[in-house]
Amino acid sequence: MRGGLIVVTLLLASASAAAAAPSDSEAKRIADAASVIRELRSAPDKGIPEHIWDRARCVAVMPGVKKAALVFGGEYGKGVVSCRTGSGWSAPLFLTLEKGSFGAQIGAQSTDVVLLVMNDRGLDRLLQDKTTLGADVSLAAGPVGRSGAAATDAQLSAEMLSYSRARGLFAGIDLSGGVIRPDHKASTGFYGHEVPDAAVVSGKDRLVPPSTARHACSEFESALNAR
């Protein structure tokens, strides 16, 4: 009987540890976001203009959004966001993006989506439980080109700028009507406890990523700092 109790105890302990461990998909989401940013920052002529990047308050990345699934309304993009703080970039916060269809502008099976949050009001909207792009927050397709052709008035005044990457090419994209929200379940599972969204992106909470995801987080921060 005692041996049976020991076995049960060990099984329960193993199950508890597995439940507390971060999902591989969350670490992969960060690693994929790092790859998107790294390629975007190294694009010689079709990346985000430096003066636009330097003005961005936060960067949100949704890697591998599937057009076919979105057309049928059943899928959504998953990503992460990091914001500038007084000491660099914040720990990643998880997000979801929902949209019925990206329309003809996507034109590919899998598309990476990047959102630049340009000011504090845009950040406040991002952290709401549900934000409709183009309605709750002003949105414009972002300008492209490393040298940066002059941005339009709409782009300069927008609270968020949106970009897509399909088949290796970056372009501005209109995401109006899409819904973005914090992914509380993913963030809680990743850090092992509930985390206040605003405290994470402000850098006030010095969160330590799980050991299995530290390399991905380091790569993400390195990609954000690349020139």
Image: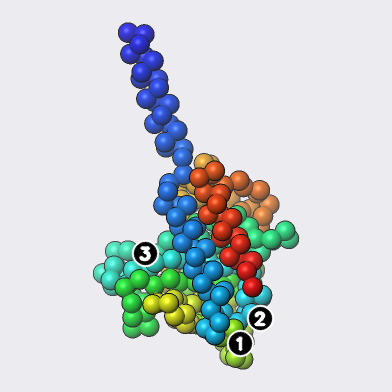
Point 59% across, 83% down: residue: 146
Q: Amino acid at mark 3?
A: Tyr
Q: Secondary structure at mark 2?
A: helix
Label 2 or label 3, whichever comes before in sequence order: 2
- Picture coordinates of residue 37, whole percent (x, y): 53, 69
Q: Is residue 137 above or below residue 189?
A: below
For disc 1, the marked residue is 148
What distance separates the C-alpha of mark 2 from that of mark 3?
A: 30 Å
Residue 100 visible, this orientation: no
Q: Amino acid at mark 1?
A: Gly
Q: Kindly check if marks 1 and 2 are in contact, taking CB atoms under 8 A apart as contact.
A: yes
For disc 3, the marked residue is 76
Q: Kindly check if marks 3 and 1 are in contact, taking CB atoms under 8 A apart as contact.
A: no
Q: Amino acid at mark 2?
A: His
Residue 166 visible, this orientation: yes
Label 3 or label 1, whichever comes before in sequence order: 3
Residue furthest left in the image? 72
Q: Secondary structure at mark 1?
A: loop
- Picture coordinates of residue 212, whole percent (x, y): 50, 45
- Picture coordinates of residue 185, whole percent (x, y): 45, 49
Q: Which mark is residue 51?
A: 2
